[in-house]
Amino acid sequence: MAGKLTDAKLQALKAPEKGQVEHSDSDVPGLRVRVGASGAKTFILRKRVGEKIHNITVGRYGPRFGLADARKKARSIISDLEAGKAAPAPARVSSAKTGTIRSMMPAYLRSKEKLRSAHDLKSVVNKYILPGLGDRFADSVTRGEISKFIAEIAETRPTRARNVLAQLSAFYSWALPQLDNLPSNPCRDAGRPPKPAARDRVLTDPELAGLWRVAEGEALPWGPALKLLMLTGTRRSEVFEADWSEFDLKAKEWTIPAERAKNGLPHIVPLSADAISLLKTIPASDDSPKLFPAMGNPENGASGHSRALKRFRKSLNEGLRRELAERWTLHDIRRTVATGLQRLGVRFEVTEAVLNHISGAKGGIAGVYQRHDWKAEKRSALDAWAKHLAGLVRKNDNGSAKKAKASQAKVRSRTTSKRLDRQDALQGA
């Protein structure tokens, strides 16, 4: 397709359904832009010198290599060819063995395996990046494609979409020295979902008591897992990915290892009597080390949290006989526990220790010298919280029973009144 190329035309070029399409630039004879089915745009130069036709890759169109750069380089190559100089060596071409994101990812993950965020990185790679882009050549993915990929994730999980983009950008920063055909990190100027507003949702006492009753109506793993979240204030991933080996029921402790803790530090969670009783009701599996193994894949923890959460919300609404005005998430339970501990008079630094946060008195230089583990204080706090939670449930049960008795009394009263009215009518007749 002939005609003078412009940046506006280049940006508007559509990818063919299959194969490649070339568009010539009338300003520099022989210069063309080739558009592949992936949407990648590559400048090439086709120049006849004597009886030989040279096909030379000029560069990939992008933020760091525009139309003016391509024309300048093409004119320089033409001058060299006409002067009898050798054509420049062709740019390295990706191969299926070394050039796909999937084939490069194992080496990248090995380079990051000592990071405390390695577990989360691997989860993002396996759940999002490889299924969506894994089989693409790493140097063929465009900024626009990444923007579309991230936008699709953001439709349902905006916070996770931002994390996926950050992890994919980190991969390209690592891979860029190996990708001769890629002028820059395609994630750098890709569309980024806005940062969600910080959540401050805390469940009310009736909601918390009602949620405990919801948990009692749920089978394994959901009911016990939901109760464990409420008793300990731990993270969802810490509960659902826990191994039985982390629990010492005699010592009444749950040790979350460093590789599973968000801050990369092991976390000892003192277990209240209610938590111990709960754990004793959970059967251990001979086929899995997990506290809550996944069906069909016992080496992993249970999944399907989104569907379960929808069911929890519906059941809680039905139990409270009203539609909650504000949605809640499983992570809001953790915030509710922290808020509840503060209401019970637990010191702030103890609450932070219960949550395994590094901030305040444990952050910065103070953390280097402050080595107290707060174990005894954490145990006292979680024991008090378990007692408070049990009291909320009992209070909710008593309130429900009183309402039921009052409702039954009203029904009996109305029934008696109607019966007397009928008797008076018969006697009058």
Image (spheres, grey):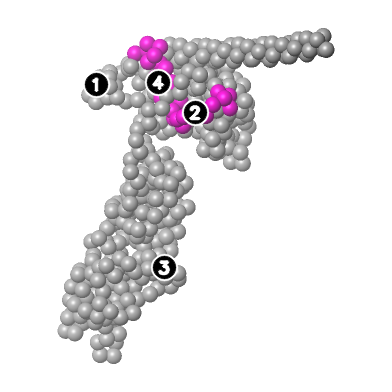
Is mark 4 in CB contact (under 8 Å) with mark 2?
no
Marks 2/3: CA–CA distance: 48 Å
Q: Earlier in the sequence, mark 4 or mark 1?
A: 4
Q: Residue at x 45, y 54 (%)?
A: 132
In this rendering, the answer to whether 372 lies above or below 265 is: above
Q: Position of residue 196 (x, y in %)?
A: 35, 38
Q: Secondary structure at mark 3?
A: loop
Label located before the other in sequence (2 or 3): 3
Label drawn at residue 366: 1
Residue 37's label in the rendered image is 3
Q: Is residue 324 magenta?
A: yes
Q: Residue 230, percent across and down? A: 49, 22
Direction from residue 72 to residue 357 in the image, left or right: right
Local packing at callout 3 (Cα closer than 10 Å; few below 14, some 14-19, many 20+) is: some
Residue found farthest to the bottom: 51
Q: Are marks 2 and 1 in contact (CB under 8 Å)?
A: no
**Residue 324 disc label:** 2
Picture disc at residue 338: 4
State the separation of the CA atoms marked 2 and 1. 42 Å
Q: Is residue 308 visible?
A: yes
Q: Quadrant of residue 294?
A: top right
> What type is the residue that disc 2 sits on?
Leu
